[in-house]
Amino acid sequence: MLNFKYLILLPIIISAFACDSFEKKTEKFEEISLNGLYTFAQTSDPNLCNPDSIVGSDCAGGLFYFSENNKVIYTFLCLGSDVTSYELGTYEIINSEIRCEFTKIFELPIDIEIDLKNLKADGRVIELVKSDIKIIKPTKCDVFPYSFSFSFQDEEQLNYVLKKENSDTNKDLIEGFQQVEVMRDFL
């Protein structure tokens, strides 16, 4: 069951879990293994490693789900929105960079998204011109092993950090996504 009523707590949860394991990493890049769910949140820390720098907002975070077969699901989770959009695509790992290419958006009205297991209406699939998001592994951080940045409509660059979620959260998300045909192809 996808239950987003606790979405407002996402930045706080990420910060709390990260505080327990705040360490610096000095070794070189290891082989990247992505499979699973990662939550992300905006950060004001230019070093991309301080859990106290997570920006609290109704729309400053979301999730990535990376499958074993190089498929990816990406969404910003915004409170107050009447629709949640999931970008669907593929990823490849090149050196320390993970390149995601999204070709579709799947939109779900918020009222049916609360419980995907009981989905009674279909979402809308939109084909996209490919858009890229590059996720770059920070070189010195165990807390947030990946980050990405982008600018929206020529505004300042925003930085986001990713944190791997536990297997229970991952399992719940997969169970919800399996209920939606278009999402199954990306698990």
Image (spheres, helix red, strand yellow):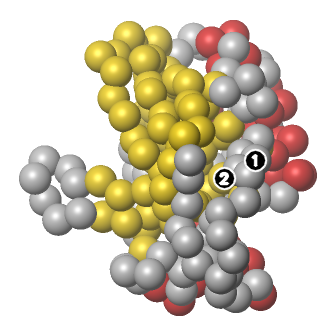
Q: Quadrant of residue 58?
A: bottom left
Q: Tell me the quarter of the image containing the N terminus.
A: top right
Query: From what the image shows, is residue 14 above or below residue 64?
Result: below
Query: From what the image shows, is residue 54 above or below residue 147?
Result: below
The amino acid type of the residue labelled 1 equals: Ser
Crowdedness near tag 2: few (<14), some (14–19) or many (≥20) residues, C-alpha within 10 Å: many
Which residue lies at the image location 65% right of the left edge and 63% below the top edge?
29
Instruction: Name the side, left or right, on which 165 lies relative to 25.
Output: right
Residue that numbered label 2 is attached to? 38
Instruction: Name the side, left or right, on which 145 lies relative to 151.
Output: right
Q: Position of residue 81 (x, y in %)?
A: 39, 44
Inter-mark Cα distance, 1 to 2:
12 Å
Q: Which mark is residue 33?
A: 1
Secondary structure of residue under mark 1 = loop
Q: Tell me the quarter of the image containing the C terminus.
A: top right
Q: Quadrant of residue 13?
A: bottom right
Q: Position of residue 89 (x, y in %)?
A: 52, 23
Q: How many numbered discs, if any? A: 2
Query: From what the image shows, is residue 67 above or below residue 75?
Result: above
The reply to whether residue 79 is in sight is no
Viewer-nearest of labels 1 and 2?
A: 1
The amino acid type of the residue labelled 2 equals: Tyr
Given residues 97 and 15, the one toward you in this image is 97
Crowdedness near tag 1: few (<14), some (14–19) or many (≥20) residues, C-alpha within 10 Å: few
Which residue lies at the image location 34% right of the left edge and 21% below the top edge?
130
Asked whether the beta carbons under mark 1 and mark 2 sit within 8 Å of each other, the answer is no
